[in-house]
Image (cartoon, helix red, strand yellow):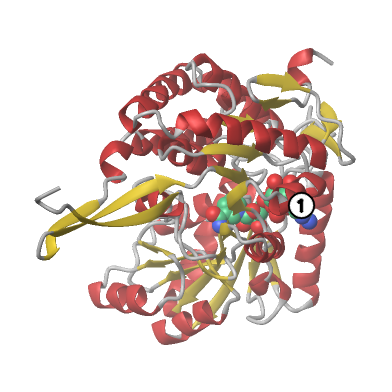
């Protein structure tokens, strides 16, 4: 194994091999080959990282914001120059296609760009003469050491949802990448070093549960940003806040799309198929349930089934491949089990992606696109976050019935509507209980200067990632009431 494929921490500017109890194994999910093995960080290693980050904070917070963002301008350029290498790494460890990987890095770069605006985004406000001769000012100050704990499915983009804002605001940060896909962040950290950023401002601590718990319990860590599955998001939120930390925890999803009979049935099936099967369905914004209204039923089902059957599945670094594997063999088994359970519950399997074998990649963890029709609304396919390329179809008679179905769900990450009616769109926007709403859009991902919203079991906290919320989250407000006597 080459030294590039070691799982290393970068703490206080030094690269080290962590030695905690959790064993980490990174696979190429298209081949089943092991790319890297290593260990997570022990509580002592987390402690050392937190102390070094705290030491770096003392000087970093005094560095003017205008100077702090110069490192981010450099990082943006380095990310762009290294986009190809980063995208290849994402595909290797995560499985998505090269274009999807390049797309995720670009969405990450958008956050670096927005954070470059911190000198104005972080401004406070003030009033003269709130009482005679008394002035009042609001300042925003950084919190100190913060942490970001990120999931496997966007190993490049999601750390960049947090890191740029955190450090631009004057904090120092510990990034704990996914134990399944840590190699991309390692490469990003090498680029961060090249910006000349002072050591200890950004630190990478690899690991799994042991490392996360040490972060959540560490007294120096003031705030935790988390993205992952809902049970872990709830756990992280509960433990972090019980320890007095700020927390923003983005969880899982089950995203419904409503297809109205007046929707453009030429383009909509393509948009829904791209949303459901893109990134092999391993996106928190994947639409996994299509609620088809009235006579849209037959044409939509036929078109989407055709698109599922014709999607080219394979290794994401090969040209023309439109969908890669899922992350682990256990994920494949779990997804195939859920398809089987759906069929037992009465759903009709229109396109069956189980038992996929991709020539030349027999060791890979592939599931082909799958379409299930008439899934029971309270059954496993309609309710579970499958996190694979599986689209369930439910047929209803009206938009009211469709919205009711959307709002019955446990999650509230995204909901989309396809229609030509402005009235239907407004009703949906007004009533649908989801944080990210798409109108004639299949993946409603907010651009970096908007918060990545989420409701119900898809989000625990109050301030979201990205945009102005990020500035609120990573700063503390201080109000100064000031009087100067004239005859001093
Ligand atoms: P996960 O919850 O398994 O892991 C997320 C992070 O938590 C990782 O860093 C992991 O090492 C750590 N972790 C895992 N189990 C833990 C435990 N028991 N205690 C402490 N830490 C633990 O999630 P995943 O499988 O990596 O990612 C997929 C999930 O993330 C899906 O549910 C998806 O919807 C969600 N997701 C949500 C968003 C969003 O914006 N809402 C974005 C991307 C992914």
Quadrant assignment, res 23: top right
Residues packed near mark 1 inside 10 Å, few (<14), some (14 to 19) or many (20 plus) = some
| Picture layout, residue 319 above or below residue 176 | above
Q: Identify the secondary structure beneath mark 1.
A: helix
Q: Going by the image, does 256 lie left or right of 420?
A: right
Q: Which residue is mark 1?
A: 213
Q: Residue at x 53, y 65 (%)?
A: 461
Q: Residue furthest front?
A: 487
| Picture layout, residue 150 above or below residue 130 | above
Q: Residue at x 62, y 40 (%)?
A: 323
Instruction: State whether label 1 is within 8 Å of ligand 1.
Output: yes
Q: Nearer the viewer, residue 274 or 65?
A: 65
Inspect this view and state whether residue 449 appears. Answer: yes
* Place of residue 44 in the rendered image (x, y in percent of width and height, measured from the top left): 81, 38
Q: Residue at x 84, y 30 (%)?
A: 38
* Place of residue 150 in the rendered image (x, y in percent of width and height, measured from the top left): 63, 45
Quadrant housing the N terminus: top right
* Place of residue 251 in the rendered image (x, y in percent of width and height, measured from the top left): 61, 60
| Picture layout, residue 345 above or below residue 487 | below
* Place of residue 51 in the rendered image (x, y in percent of width and height, measured from the top left): 67, 35
Quadrant assignment, res 245: bottom right
């Amino acid at each position: 194994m080459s030294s590039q494929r070691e799982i290393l921490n970068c703490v206080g500017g030094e690269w080290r091999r962590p030695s905690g109890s959790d064993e980490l194994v990174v696979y190429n999910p298209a081949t089943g080959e092991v790319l890297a093995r290593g260990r997570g960080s022990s509580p002592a290693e987390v402690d050392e990282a937190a102390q070094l980050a705290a030491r770096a904070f003392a000087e970093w917070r005094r560095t003017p914001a205008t100077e702090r963002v110069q490192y981010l301008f450099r990082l943006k350029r380095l990310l762009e120059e290294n986009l190809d290498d980063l995208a290849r790494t994402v595909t290797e460890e995560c499985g998505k296609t090269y274009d999807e990987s390049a797309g995720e890095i670009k969405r990450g770069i958008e956050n670096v760009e927005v954070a470059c605006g911190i000198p104005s985004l972080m401004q406070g406000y003030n009033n003269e003469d709130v009482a005679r001769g008394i002035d009042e000012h609001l300042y925003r100050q950084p919190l100190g050491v913060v942490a970001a704990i990120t999931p496997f499915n966007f190993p490049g983009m999601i750390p960049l949802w947090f890191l740029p804002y955190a450090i631009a605001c004057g904090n120092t940060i510990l990034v704990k990448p996914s134990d399944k896909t840590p190699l991309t962040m390692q490469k990003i950290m090498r680029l961060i070093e090249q910006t000349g950023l002072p050591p200890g401002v950004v630190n990478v601590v690899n690991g799994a549960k042991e490392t996360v718990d040490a972060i959540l319990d560490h007294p120096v860590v003031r705030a935790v940003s988390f993205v992952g599955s809902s049970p872990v998001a709830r756990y992280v939120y509960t433990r972090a806040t019980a320890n007095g930390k700020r927390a923003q925890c983005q969880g899982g999803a089950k995203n419904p799309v409503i297809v109205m009979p007046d929707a453009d049935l030429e383009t909509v099936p393509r948009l829904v198929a791209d949303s459901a099967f893109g990134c092999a369905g391993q996106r928190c914004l994947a639409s996994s349930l299509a609620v088809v209204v009235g006579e849209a039923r037959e044409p939509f089902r036929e078109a989407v089934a055709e698109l599922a059957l014709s999607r080219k599945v394979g290794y994401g670094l090969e040209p023309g491949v439109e969908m890669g594997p899922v992350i682990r063999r256990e994920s494949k088994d779990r997804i195939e089990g859920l398809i089987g359970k759906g069929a037992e519950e009465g759903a009709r399997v229109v396109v069956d992606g189980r038992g996929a074998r991709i020539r030349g990649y027999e060791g890979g963890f592939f599931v082909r696109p799958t379409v299930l029709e008439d899934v029971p609304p309270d059954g496993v396919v309609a309710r579970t976050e499958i996190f694979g390329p599986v689209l369930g179809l439910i047929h209803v008679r009206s938009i009211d019935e469709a919205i009711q179905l959307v709002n019955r769900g446990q999650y509230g990450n995204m909901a989309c509507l396809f229609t030509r009616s402005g009235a239907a769109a407004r009703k949906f926007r007004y009533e649908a209980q989801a944080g990210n709403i798409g109108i004639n859009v299949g993946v409603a991902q907010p651009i970096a200067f908007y918060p990545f919203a989420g409701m119900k079991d898809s989000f625990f906290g109050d301030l979201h990632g990205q945009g102005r919320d990020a500035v609120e989250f990573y700063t503390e407000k201080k109000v100064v009431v000031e009087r100067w006597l004239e005859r001093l």
